[in-house]
Amino acid sequence: MNTILITGGAGFIGSHVVRLFVEKYPDYAIYNLDALTYAGNLENLKDVEKASNYTFLKADICDAETIQSLFKKYRFNKVIHLAAESHVDRSITDPLAFLKTNVLGTINLLNAAKSIWKNDFSNKLFYHVSTDEVYGTLGESGLFTETTSYNPNSPYSASKASSDHFVRAYGETYGLPYIISNCSNNYGPNQFPEKLIPLFIHNILQNKSLPVYGNGNYTRDWLYVIDHAIAINIVFHKGKISETYNIGGCNEWKNIDLVKLLCKLMDVKINKAEGSSERLITFVKDRPGHDLRYAIDATKIRHQLGWKPRVTFETGLSNTIDWYLQNKEWLNNVTSGKYQEYYKKQYATN
Ligand code: NAD
Ligand code: DAU
């Protein structure tokens, strides 16, 4: 029997992880703890909210006392920690928010686990979900492996690197059983439209310009979110304690090529004349400290745990567009109010 705390389960990746666990493991008790920030949305979990093995807990991981009392009350034996501030651009305008949630929030969870589990670590696990951005940037060639040195360049990646270090340090110092995974760029249904793919889908639907940073020659390794959720499930059940696993799509795209492909697909799906979406592309001021290229070597998880991505980029991107077209209400709800202020501020100088 597992009593699992999943943090950040109302967010993009977290909601897919929660759904997978709730549906696949009726015998586990799944607790989704989320502060419901701008990025958290319980609409993402409407289909599983009534499941008997699922409970939602609204709480902030920065609130140490509440976190401690929830650990005491529910006796979680395993944690999958995804709650975070996750958008690089926001970290550039407000680094402190990233330090608070990503670093202090993680330490609060580690402290609660350590004090409730005491020294009985049998059948316990603290699984920290992290990012490939901790490794910094690659040049035109090479891949990130699990032994690549950390070299974070943005406040977001610095905060995630710091949280990774704290998780590892609690393992070394107190014996806390942990696993970390570092994943590449995710895309798919339910992603908040501040990230490249959903932002551009939304802008095309609104006939708004598509702000490509710099010259667009930046490369990311894209993975369909459900493939990431499947990887998390495999790492959670089969991963070795104190190990790190890199997760990636083996699917590198230069931003400008990806955006052009997205534009072509959108033209077809919303019956626009060929080339109309592409005409919305506007090259704008670059992101400060913009990492040139991320790409993951996923050999370890592939060979040791038998995971590999299942969804091709063509299928994943097409599914993603279809999801946004079929969920316009979701999109409208998350892009009203505060989103408008964020958008004006972020893209004003462009
Ligand atoms: P997201 O921004 O969509 O969701 C984050 C969730 O965390 C939201 O539901 C939000 O309400 C919650 N949250 C934020 N601050 C909180 C707090 N103080 N207390 C409790 N809950 C809080 O993020 P995502 O893209 O789903 O990313 C999830 C995790 O995966 C993050 O840790 C991120 O660093 C990591 N990651 C993301 C990607 C990606 O491409 N999106 C890739 C690799 C790793
Ligand atoms: O690599 C994993 C990381 O991927 C995760 O840890 C982060 O949480 C996630 O946000 C993502 O970070 P990126 O910065 O790579 O994702 P984003 O969607 O913000 O940007 C992808 C690329 O597109 C990047 O090179 C910047 C560029 N971009 C982005 C936006 C929002 C633009 O050109 N224009 C834009 O408006």
Image (cartoon, rainbow, N blue to C red):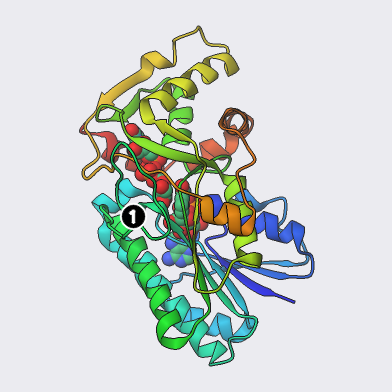
Q: Going 27% across and 57% down the picture, which residue do you hit?
A: 151
Give the image quarter of residue 343: top left
Q: Position of residue 303 (x, y in %)?
A: 59, 54
Q: Position of residue 39 (x, y in %)?
A: 47, 51
Left or right: residue 102 versus residue 234 is left
Q: Position of residue 283 (x, y in %)?
A: 27, 24
Point out the residue furthest to the top here.
Answer: 273
Q: Going 70% across and 75% down the picture, which residue do you hit?
A: 2
How many marks can you see? 1
Q: Position of residue 237 (x, y in %)?
A: 66, 66
> Is residue 41 visible from the viewing direction of this image?
no
Tell me the quadrant of ligand 2.
top left
Give the image quarter of residue 156: bottom left
Q: Going 30% across and 36% down the picture, which residue do you hit?
A: 140
Q: Which residue occupies the foreground of this view, 60 or 310?
A: 310
Quadrant placement of the C terminus: top left
Q: On screen, 202 above or below 291?
A: above
Task: Classify mark 1: helix, strand or loop.
Answer: helix
Give the image quarter of residue 65: bottom left
Point out the residue furthest to the bottom here.
Answer: 119
> Is residue 150 visible from the viewing direction of this image?
yes
Q: Which residue is mark 1?
A: 135
Quadrant placement of the N terminus: bottom right
Q: On screen, 29 above or below 296?
A: below
Q: On screen, 139 above or below 133?
A: above
Q: Going 39% across and 23% down the picture, which residue do you hit?
A: 208
Identified by mark 1, the residue type is Tyr
Q: On screen, 161 above or below 251?
A: below
Q: Which residue occupies the foreground of this view, 159 or 349?
A: 159
